[in-house]
Amino acid sequence: MSTQELNKTRAEAFAEKLVGLLNGGSLALMVSVGHRTGLFDAMAFLPPSTSAQVAEAAKLQERYVREWLGAMVTGGIVEYDAGTQTYSLPPEHAASLTRAATPNNLAVGFQFLPVLGSVEDRVVESFRNGGGVPYSEYGRFHEVMAEESGQTVVAGMFEHILPLAPGLEDALRRGIDVLDVGCGRGRALALLAEAFPQSRFTGYDFSEEAVAEANAQAERKGLTNLRYVVKDVATLADAERFDLITAFDAIHDQAQPAKVLAGISKALRPDGIFLMQDIAGSSHLHKNMELPLGPMLYTISCMHCMTVSLALGGAGLGTMWGEELACKMLDEAGFRQVEVRRLPHDIINSYYIAKKQ
């Protein structure tokens, strides 16, 4: 076989791959729509149904539902009986697509795609001119992150995350001071405050919108041991004030991550614990070739995490800063003991248990 024939074969195979990507990307957008509109949740409890019956169950407009179902059927997500013109969502598919499937609802993550797509023009400008896209440009970002956190952090808090630090739950029951850095809407912190009323909880985030929502939720729940504060965590000036500091998927977004980590180290009491959740991966591209969500994570980095840091003139670490760099920066911040763990319920993140002594 000649070189030209080999190249032609390779070109055709790559073109087929691109067609698959185009279909997959289109279907991903429709999965996000299906999650947001509650269509998957409605269909999970329906027998084989017409588009009108599906629309009625979900309280939506039939014409839009019919077109959405077309994408779902041709994409192999929903099954269709041409004889009866009815649609059904197999239970095996519902197990990864409905709110009842939490923390295994993969549809939650599909929402990031339209959120990121909404700033494509601004990111393209940054490719050409430098700089970045600020947080304020990302509609629904905190909403989607809160839901994603519900699947990884909130869902696994008691069974998986707190046991990473032996004795931590007992200390929380007795009463300690806790800070969450980059708390967003504060779902994780609220969960802890409700479970451990003897402890005192503070959340810092520079988003006024997220902090306002978090404080409103805390007030509705009557959580008097919890407060959220609008604060740039690069300006942390607390000295040995907290027994536990957490940062859930927040450090790599920072404009000044080294300064934030140094501030966290200073704010911890000598025997305190810093519990950091961040993206699982290597600082070296060639070691990330087998990551299940590698392309998605680099895309999120380019379209959000890196660019929001660069928008502030920051380091632009990006989502994929990696465990090697994370451990190096933790050491430079004064953490002499760092353990990195992975958890079975969370394929995206690593968990760092860091201590100063």
Image (cartoon, rainbow, N blue to C red):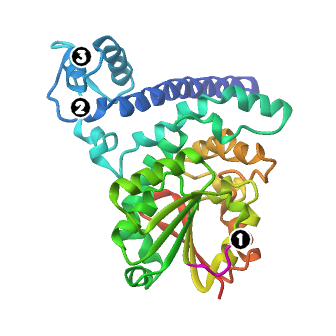
Query: Residue type at mark 3?
Result: Ser
Q: Which residues are magenta?
A: 237-242
Q: Is residue 102 left or right of residue 55?
A: right
SS type, badge 3: helix
Q: Nearer the viewer, residue 19 or 166?
A: 166
Q: Is residue 233 left or right of residue 200?
A: right
Looking at the rendered image, the disc whose residue lies closer to the viewer, 1 or 2, is 1
Q: Label 1 to label 2, Cα distance in Å?
A: 49 Å
Which disc is residue 1 wearing? none
Amino acid type at mark 1:
Ala
Q: Vertical placement of 16 versus 224: above or below?
A: above
Tags 1 and 2 in contact by the CB under 8 Å rule? no
Q: Are marks 1 and 3 in contact (CB under 8 Å)?
A: no
Where does label 3 land, which residue? Answer: 51
Q: Identify the residue under disc 1.
A: 237
Query: Which residue type does callout 2 highlight?
Result: Ala
Element type at marker 1?
A: loop
Disc 2 designates what residue? Answer: 42
Q: Main secondary structure of the magenta part?
A: loop
Mark found first going from the N terminus, 2 or 3: 2
Q: CA distance from mark 1 to mark 3?
A: 58 Å
Marks 2 and 3 in Cβ contact (< 8 Å): no
- Which of discs 1 and 3 lies nearer the camera? The answer is 1
Q: Position of residue 246 (x, y in %)?
A: 55, 68
Residue 292 shows up from this direction: no
Lower sequence index among marks 1 and 2: 2
Residue sitting at 46 percent across and 54 percent down?
Answer: 215
Quarter residue 117 falls in: top right
Q: Secondary structure at mark 2?
A: helix
